[in-house]
Image (cartoon, grey):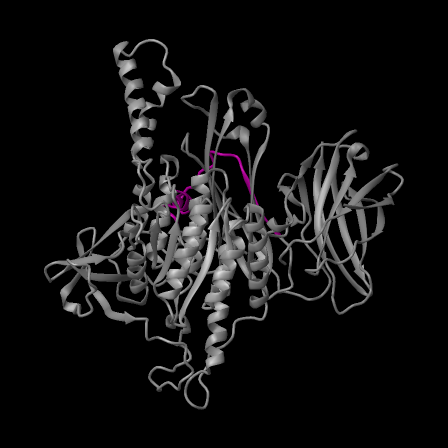
Amino acid sequence: MKRLTILLPAFFLSAFSLAGQQQSQQNTSSQATSPTVRSTANEVVLDMVFRDKKGRTIHDIRPEEIHVLEDGVEQKVTSFHLVEGKSAELSGAPKTPADSGSLSLDPMREVRLVTLVFEGLDQEGKRFFRQALKDILDMAPEQNLYFSIVTVDHGLQVLQPLTSDHAALLKSMDRSMMWSFTQYENQSTEVKQELQQILSGGEPQVQGGAAGGPSQSQVQSAVNYRMAKMQYDMLQQSEAADRAYNARATIDALMALVRAQSQLPGRKVVLYFNPWLFIPEAVKEQYSNLISVANRANVSFYTVDPKGLVTWSQDENGRQGLSGAAGETRSQQMRGGVGEVSIGQARAAETAENALRSNPLLWLRDLAQQTGGVTIAETNDYRAPLRTAMEEVRTYYEASYAPHIAVYDGKFRKISIRVDRPDVVVHSRSGYFALPQIKGGQQLFAYEMPLLNALNASAAPHDVDFQVGAERFNDRGPKVEYMVTLEAPLKGLTFTPQPDQKTSAVDTALLAVVKNSNGEIVEKFSKDFAVQVAQDKVNAYKEGNLVQTFRTELPPGAYSLEAVVMDRFDNKTCVKKTSISVPDPSSKLSVSDVVVVRRTEALKDNQILDAFYFPGGKVVPTLTNTLKGGPGNILPFYFAVYPDRAVKDTPKLTMSFYREGQYLGAAEAPLPDVQRDGRIPYIANLPADKFTPGAYEIRIGVTQGSLKAEEKVTFQVD
């Protein structure tokens, strides 16, 4: 960490340190009186595969033969047709006037996407995966079939981005056969950088030429850009996900994959290899959300158990757990329900439920069945089912309808399909949660509906203490970067003792939305904060704060930022609203908002995500403006300088100090070198022993040649 020591005005009688941090990798409100969730097009698109009783695909289903029902109510099907992908090719052949319009052309409908995901594989499992990959590629000679290789290991890592190059796919898998998590992570970081390079050139335009249609190079460039954007967004979402528990990390990783693929049209297939998938009760809600989002995004999971045929029962662990839970219950019953209750007895019901759910095949089959795929398990002859899966990638029926949803209540809507033909088996999706889509395509989750309802309530509740704010950073355009921060004192949340009598739990949900001047939600951020704390550490834990930050980019304009915190244990809620005025982007010299720092945390370089991150660390902000003075204390502030790249002069920093409006003095210092992303992150640590109680203002002034930029921060010292 580079430190600069400069002299301050005499009233401080000491020096303070300025620590120049390294770069990050990237880089008035309208309030509606009624609920302001506005849905985009509410069309539901279903892909279906029809087979006869012998398993053969049926290709002659007529529209009048099918009936689509939601919760038993028949829906009016507006479109039904057969999609035959095998013959679809990326072609630059001239189009007729009827099908070459630049507004309706979507080259992504010409390709098929297959993502191969593996998790929890030993060396034998990796060899199985590699052979399965080769067999699949041998079955897929078409140039419009794109494959990618992804692993879930402490998060989602991309080993090979989408490509139709079979040799590249096999090479990537061969290279990673002996890799560890660190090597997976490093490879995924390299892939992300390559994707970012593709996106930096902007999205190519696909337009008709003199012959009436786009050129082959235009189509291919558009396809490459869309796939790169999808995979880059997937990695961004996965890096921001919660890694607290294995099952939650798995769902978070798969959710990032599914949400990213929702940007693309058509049927998408995920071949998911996992020998030990288990969904405990604690993450059942997130698992249901994964299925709902996958179904709305037309993503089907084809799950594979790489163990093949085994000589032991995969239900054995479940039977042992169920037997143990029954024994604990009988022991308690024999004592007449009196006496000291053991931990095992207190958790007998939970143990029994988890035992019933512990068979990994149950979850592989459920994930596939609920999303319109199939499971390949308990067989050593997997080529036939893989061939079936590839057939369903190429050829399927697609139906669409507008559901009759009067109120978005967040409830699950079960889809069933009836065919007026005997002995027809239909493979399709199980249903989805009745949730509106937000402007820009973001998905709402079922657990977010109570939070959204609280935001839209006529009387905003204030039962939980918290603060919300938005800090401006990179303004180099075309949008302006903001960091949204929510901060809640932990002492205001409910700590509930757990059955083991050794821990207490906190269960809190956060939601923040940004609305434009029309009251439409243009950005949404949410987080579940569920932790268990040792009973003897609860009081110390309550002295801390829950701080959650989110990154967004906004076009110039007036916005409202609305946030809600819900304490689920006590059903307490608080809503806060503020405004954001986004200025025009600029290439001139500028300074970000000045942020008070709560602490810094050490992180790896490849976890850089936003304006608060730098290689090896992250700034954790605080929204409080009351700081503690006196000997031994530090007043830390963070900001970033964005020099004008057209000016060769070196930027210089001046900090001016005011107390109760009275000028105290100023100090100057050179800034560290500009980072690769064009910014200079900076932390100023001021010794607090010379700050007597009172109201202060610090003005951060930066000059570069004849250019000047200034921001200020106000705070109170106790």
Would you say 245 lies left or right of 676 here?
left
The one nearer the camera, 138 or 183, is: 138
From the image, which quarter does the C terminus lie in?
A: top right
Instruction: Using the rendered view, name the quadrant where residue 192 is placed.
Output: bottom right
| x and y, in percent, of residue 587 in the image | 69, 66
Q: Is residue 463 magenta?
A: yes
| x and y, in percent, of residue 90 in the image | 41, 77
Note whether residue 308 is visible.
yes
| x and y, in percent, of residue 187 in the image | 57, 55
| x and y, in percent, of residue 167 in the image | 48, 66
Instruction: Using the rendered view, name the quadrant where residue 618 is placed.
Output: top right
Would you say 305 lies left or right of 163 here?
left
From the image, which quarter does the N terminus lie in?
A: top right
Q: Which residues are magenta?
A: 445-471
Q: Is residue 620 above or below residue 543?
A: below
Considering every residue shown, the one lying at the far bottom of the view is 210
